[in-house]
Amino acid sequence: MADSAREPRLALVTGGARGIGRAVALELARGGYNVAVNFRSSAEAAAALVKELESLGVRAGAFQADVSNREQVEVLFKRIREALGPVGVLVNNAGITHDTLLMRMKAEDWDAVLSANLSSAFYCTKEAVRDMARAKWGRIVTISSVVGITGNAGQANYAASKAGLIGFTKSVAREYAARGITANAVAPGFIDTSMTEVLKDDVKAAISAQIPEGHIGTPEDVARAVAFFAHSGSAYITGQVLAVDGGLTMC
Ligand code: NDP
């Protein structure tokens, strides 16, 4: 969705080198945004994506940082500001799973998932709103999950982090609504990425049977919802959670 009513703005996509983040980076670039791609370990994929983004006519850069680490996030934003300017759109996308049943879940599984999925959004949003408040304009889009709404056996840590992101998003939305900054969440259902490719075929078939649309979604399905919230025309929409799940939850 092209956003032609303005100067090119810079979008930061955390964990943007692959999966949903990669699709979001490409969709935003097609809409005319310059894009900073954050990656933790996928350096080659990030470099290839930057070339692809530049071929779409926008400015882009790849920036390594573990966003679960507060100091690294501070350095990340400093480097992005120096290279590409202030961040106008933040997409909190980076995420991991360490799935197991509660009785087997170690404190390390809990801490790792909460820091990568939830604390990362706190660190990045805190940095980004400094730029956005100065510009009196900003879009924060956070990738939650339908399991943050429904819960899921074997994912107590992941579901808690994704539910936390919804409370976080609504609180930030309230704090910044009067300053031209919106905060919304996208809650994907089952999307075809490396996060779900570990599922066995019979599990995937059982999941698809539960989805009214009858199939697992694509990263591009999620990217289009992110681009909608990021658009300058979505100024009167904040604190919302949009499920992209083929009708799985309908809540
Ligand atoms: P992938 O496993 O394909 O990609 C995860 C991305 O997150 C990678 O780019 C990875 O970077 C990055 N990442 C993980 N930890 C960190 C970190 N500490 N710092 C920086 N980057 C990090 O997953 P998806 O694309 O499927 O997931 C993207 C988001 O969507 C996640 O938040 C996930 O929870 C959410 N989601 C996914 C669903 C699905 O069905 N796939 C459903 C609902 C939500 P690198 O490769 O560089 O390590």
Image: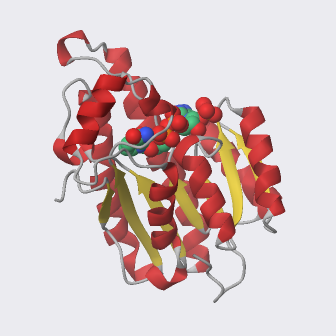
Residue at position x 53%, y 76% in the image: 231
Give how far across and how far down residue 29 sits, in percent. Answer: 68, 65
Residue 93 in the figure: left or right of residue 144: right
- The part of the image, by quadrant, that contains residue 225 is bottom left
Up-down: is 118 above or below 131?
above
Pick the residue in front: 80 or 62.
62
Residue 183 in the figure: left or right of residue 241: right
The C terminus is located in which quarter? Answer: bottom left
- The part of the image, by quadrant, that contains residue 229 is bottom left
Up-down: is 208 above or below 41?
below
Pick the residue in front: 186 or 26.
26
Residue at position x 45%, y 57% in the image: 221
Residue at position x 38%, y 57% in the image: 186
Pick the residue in front: 202 or 170.
202
Give how far across and how far down residue 250 sits, in percent. Answer: 18, 59
Give how far across and how far down residue 115 sits, in percent. Answer: 43, 33
Answer yes or no: is residue 66 visible: no
- The part of the image, by quadrant, that contains residue 24 is bottom right
The N terminus is located in which quarter? Answer: bottom right
Which colour assignment does the render follow? secondary structure
Give how far across and how far down residue 90 sits, in percent. Answer: 55, 60
Residue 209 in the figure: left or right of residue 201: left
* Residue at the far bottom in the pictured view: 5
Answer yes or no: is residue 149 visible: yes
Q: How many marks?
A: 0
Residue at position x 30%, y 67% in the image: 240
Pick the residue in front: 76 or 199.
199
